[in-house]
Amino acid sequence: MQPEVRPFRHAATATWSYVVSDPRTRAAAIIDPVLDFDLYSGRCGGAAADEIAAVVRDRRLTVEWILETHAHADHLTAARRLQAGLGGHIAIGSGIRDVQRAFAALLDLEPEFVTDGRQFDRLLEDGENLALGSLRVQVITTPGHTSDSLSYLIGDAVFVGDSIFLPDSGTARCDFPGGDAGSLWASIQRLYGLPPATRVFVCHDYAPGGREPRCETTIAAERAGNIHVRDGTAAAEFIALRRSRDAGLDLPRLLYPAVQFNIRAGRPPPPAASGRSWFRLPCHGAGDPGP
Ligand SMILES: [Fe+2]
């Protein structure tokens, strides 16, 4: 039995989220759900998450898992919001602890912020299997973009997060704290070792050249034609390409709020005395601090 995969496109962040379900038992996992967020006002919105919840309810699915492929830097996660309405356990790779440590230091987070991953319901290791009705979710660690990056193999479908994108779009950046192009190359080799007919579902598609956004390809198509790593690409060649591209990239627009929200498993920072929560943003290069 193969899983049913329902993709959801979040246009503002070019993110693909998924509801993956077992046709036999109607058990479901939600992968990488997005919370709407307006950077100018700091206001969160649930339209994208509500669309997912509506499909889950219409199809009478039981959400067992809400799975993050990594702590995202370009959108806020709707994991917590969806859990409140639908249940399920929020899981992420155990490498989240490294990501929490790195960003707690970088952002001068509050001393009470703990970096042992306890904000999540479950921390996952390479090779673990999660039950999803009569299916199983196999955890494959695929670090490189971040140190907590995972792929989830469910039947004939693999959800690769930010590692490979569609063949015409190459691979994910590796310049965040804990990122490493050599690790990504090794992770991609693992993915390319899956059966060639395996369906590949990506986390982002930026639709180059004005083509329609897409979310799905196969391992065979990636190995034949990925513009950054295909069969025969040497590690050194990929690493040099990835590093030179990363050197020219801007930071993601939502980097600071996204990281602060996502390493807390989809919760806002603790409220200030006013009762309001705030995101931190660095102030570089403005000279000496004032009195
Ligand atoms: Fe990412």
Image (cartoon, helix red, strand yellow):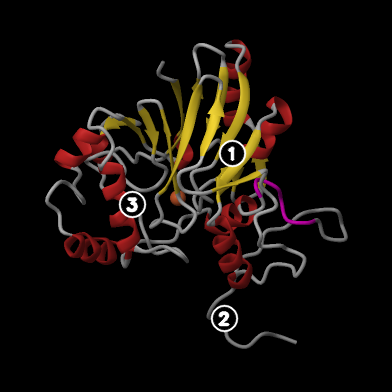
Separation of marks 3 and 2 at Cα, in angstroms: 40 Å
Element on which disc 2 rests: loop
Q: Which residue is mark 1?
A: 36
Tag 2: amino acid: Ala
* Magenta-highlighted residues: 265-270
Q: Which residue is mark 3?
A: 187
Mark 3 surroundings: few (<14), some (14-19) or many (≥20) residues within 10 A: many
Q: Nearer the viewer, residue 90 or 124?
A: 124
Separation of marks 3 and 1 at Cα, in angstroms: 30 Å
How many marks are shown on the rendered structure?
A: 3
| Dominant secondary structure (helix, strand or loop) of the stretch shown in magenta | loop
Separation of marks 1 and 2 at Cα, in angstroms: 31 Å
User: Does 283 appear in magenta?
Assistant: no
Residue sitting at x 22%, y 32%:
196
Residue sitting at x 21%, y 51%:
228
Tag 3: amino acid: Ser
In the image as oriented, which residue stretches furthest toward the right? 273
Q: Are marks 3 and 2 in contact (CB under 8 Å)?
A: no
User: Residue 88's x, y, as percent?
Assistant: 66, 31
Above or below residue 279? Residue 247 is: below
Tag 1: amino acid: Asp
Q: Is residue 223 left or right of residue 7?
A: left
Element on which disc 3 rests: helix
User: Residue 82's x, y, as percent?
Assistant: 66, 31
Quadrant location, the N terminus: top left
Above or below residue 148? Residue 60 is: above
User: Residue 102's x, y, as percent?
Assistant: 56, 68
The answer to whether one can see residue 156 in this image is yes
The answer to whether one can see residue 18 in this image is no
Quadrant location, the C terminus: bottom right
Q: Which disc, if any, is residue 286?
A: 2
